[in-house]
Amino acid sequence: MSLLGARNDLPNPYQAGVDFGQLPPGRKWGSTASVTTAADNTIWVVDRCGNSGAGGTTCAGASATVNPVFQFDTTGKLLKTFGAGMFVSPHKLTVDEAGNVWVADNGSHQIFKMDQNGRVLMTLGKKGVAGPGNDEFDAPTEVAIAPNGDIFVADGHTGGGLAIGNARVVKFDKNGKFIKTWGKKGMGPGEFDVPHTIAIDSRGRVFVGDRQNNRIQIFDQDGRFLAQWFQFGRPSGMYIDKKTDTLYVADSESRDGRTNTGRFALAQTGYGFNPGIRRGIRVGSARDGSVRAFIPDPCPYPYASGSTLAEGVTVDAQGNVYGADFNQDVRKFVPTRARQTN
């Protein structure tokens, strides 16, 4: 099944986004490409070390006091922070049903499993080694955990466009033993061009945000291709509420070739080219692919190049949506029927 056509004219049932998260004194956000919700309704964020001296784009060389992993309550109160000195370029963060915290570090080519105090429980991949082996990654992007504990890794941020690199999903058992891998570079079913985000729905299907192909691909847990959806735009981040199978997709890059002046330019038709599609967060159903809401990017130049609005997205138990902005911010979008609480 292939559903076509992301729409820009869907209703936006949310108030304008407000800054979220009370940071420690003197701390500022780095690039925040990931936000997620834990089973206890706390909000977790990983950033790229905003006080690192490198513009918040990497944790390499950051001070031992700069923690990139944050836990907040839904009002934005800081509950916990940890992870100083652990990562090079933390990309996405996942909290599984047991409360374990997983970070995909595409700079060190590793996956880390931690408890909620930052104690490392498991490491996958070889530090600083990029490769296609069963125990290697090449800039892994995100982790999804199945109910039985199986681990699914989206692997291959560096292989976009004409670049050479991994473009696959790697599956391990709950103990980190390799099971299988699927996918290769390409545009066909089961092929990827930057598998940037991964999630599992209530039926156990594996959703992969195939970003440079402007689509979501859906598989069973053995890697059999089931469907591809284009109606959610260019997926940088995904979150599935398994109680309702509501699918939230962050598109931070779509553009149609226009510059900031509104004029079309051939030079703008490369990375992120997705004609007619606006950036934003689309909300729909993981069951049938229908899309019912759209939070548009407030950028005054919504079709120009660059990455704006959310790269990561999640929702809390009250229906508030959170977007982790690569441009160093986290925003909270409250449903219009609700009262703002922070």
Image: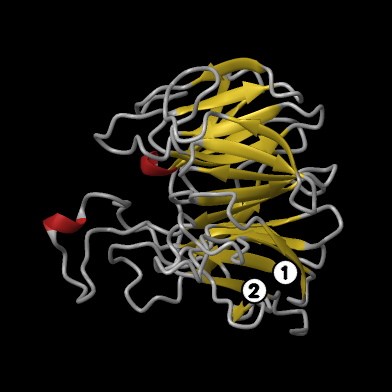
Amino acid on which the number 2 mark rests in the picture:
Phe
Pointers 1 and 2 in contact (C-beta within 8 Å): yes
Q: Residue at x 16, y 70 (%)?
A: 263
Where does residue 207 sit, x and y in percent of width and height? 60, 36
Above or below — where is 146 with respect to 115?
above
Q: Amino acid at mark 1?
A: Asn
Comparing 227 with 86, the one in front is 86
Q: Quick one: which residue is furthest to the left in this view?
A: 266
The relative height of residue 282 versus residue 335 in the rendered view (above or below) is above
Q: Pick the quarter of the image with the C terminus.
A: bottom right
Does residue 100 appear in the picture of this structure? yes
The residue most toward the front is 64
Q: Work out whether residue 30 or residue 244 is closer to the camera in this orientation and state it.
A: 30
Q: Which residue is mark 2?
A: 333
Q: Which residue is mark 1?
A: 320
Mark 1 nearby-residue class (10 Å; few <14, some 14–19, many ≥20): some
Q: CA distance from mark 1 to mark 2?
A: 6 Å
